[in-house]
């Protein structure tokens, strides 16, 4: 339970899917892994999907804000785009907190959308070639009691 993450080497695309119970420690570990990425090529794109099944009951807004502040250091963000699709109300609110925390004028763009706008997010970041694969992964992780291993089967 928590965070599924995949780094696509081409076209500099990162996918994160939050599902089930998400903890402060998981957010911290996820951001630490992202910051290890030495990719300095500008224009990287990311898609973060917060599943309807994702629970923030044990996640603090401070951890989300801290994660956003830490992401200001990411080398791959210059001229990049991040789309966050939140399929539940609490996730949408936390995504907005993250958006505010990551903002650095002129660095990149972050767009927060509601759950029904997944296709819009995929098109906006320019990864339509992966749309069916992304939808399949999100659908698998929306299943009750899904684990990140569910993607592999």
Image (spheres, helix red, strand yellow):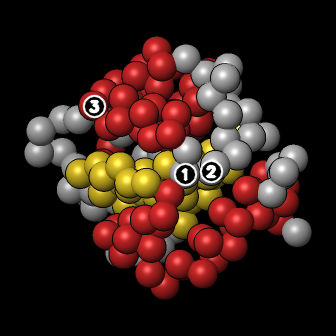
**Who comes first in sequence, dot 2 or dot 1?**
2
In the image, 51 versus 76, the foreground residue is: 51
Secondary element at image label 1: loop
| Image location (x, y in percent) of residue 80 | 28, 56
**Could you tell me residue 106's position as x and y percent?**
11, 45
3D distance between C-alphas at marks 2 and 1:
5 Å
Q: Residue at x 48, y 19 (%)?
A: 61
Decide which of 108, 63 is in the foreground and name it: 63
Q: Is residue 83 above or below residue 22?
A: below
- The answer to whether the residue labelled 3 contacts the one labelled 1, judged by CB atoms less than 8 Å apart, is no
Q: Which residue has dot 3 on it?
A: 100
Quadrant placement of the C terminus: bottom right
72 lies above or below 131: above
The residues tagged by marks 3 and 1 sit, at their Cα atoms, a distance apart of: 19 Å
Of the two numbered discs 3 and 1 on the same chain, state the one appearing first in sequence. Answer: 1
To which quarter of the image does residue 135 belong? bottom right
Q: CA distance from mark 2 to mark 3?
A: 21 Å
79 left or right of 30? Answer: left
Mark closer to the chain start, 2 or 3: 2
Query: Up-down: is 25 above or below 9?
Result: above
Residue 133 visible in image: yes
Q: Nearer the viewer, residue 92 or 7?
A: 92
Say which mark, if any, is on residue 87: 1
Q: What residue is rendered at 46% in x and 15% in y?
A: 62
Mark 3 or mark 1, whichever is nearer to me: 1
Q: Residues within 10 Å of mark 1 (few under 14, many from 20)?
A: many
The residue carrying mark 2 is: 51
Under circle 2, the secondary element is loop
Asked if marks 2 and 1 touch (Cβ < 8 Å), the reply is yes
**Quadrant location, the N terminus:** top right
Q: Give the percent coordinates (x, y) of residue 29.
A: 62, 29
């Amino acid at each position: 339970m928590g965070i599924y993450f995949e780094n696509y080497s081409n076209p500099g695309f990162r996918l994160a899917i939050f599902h089930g119970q998400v903890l402060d420690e998981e957010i911290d570990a996820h951001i630490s892994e992202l910051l290890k990425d030495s990719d300095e090529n500008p224009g990287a794109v990311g898609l973060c999907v917060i599943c309807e099944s994702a629970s923030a009951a044990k996640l603090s807004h401070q951890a989300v804000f801290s994660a956003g502040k830490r992401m200001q250091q990411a080398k791959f963000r210059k001229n990049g785009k991040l789309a966050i699709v939140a399929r539940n109300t609490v996730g949408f609110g936390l995504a907005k907190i993250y958006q505010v925390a990551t903002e650095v004028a002129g660095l990149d763009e972050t767009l927060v959308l509601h759950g029904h706008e997944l296709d819009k997010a995929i098109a906006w970041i320019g990864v339509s070639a992966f749309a069916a694969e992304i939808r399949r992964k999100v659908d698998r992780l929306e299943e009750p009691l899904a684990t990140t291993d569910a993607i592999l089967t």
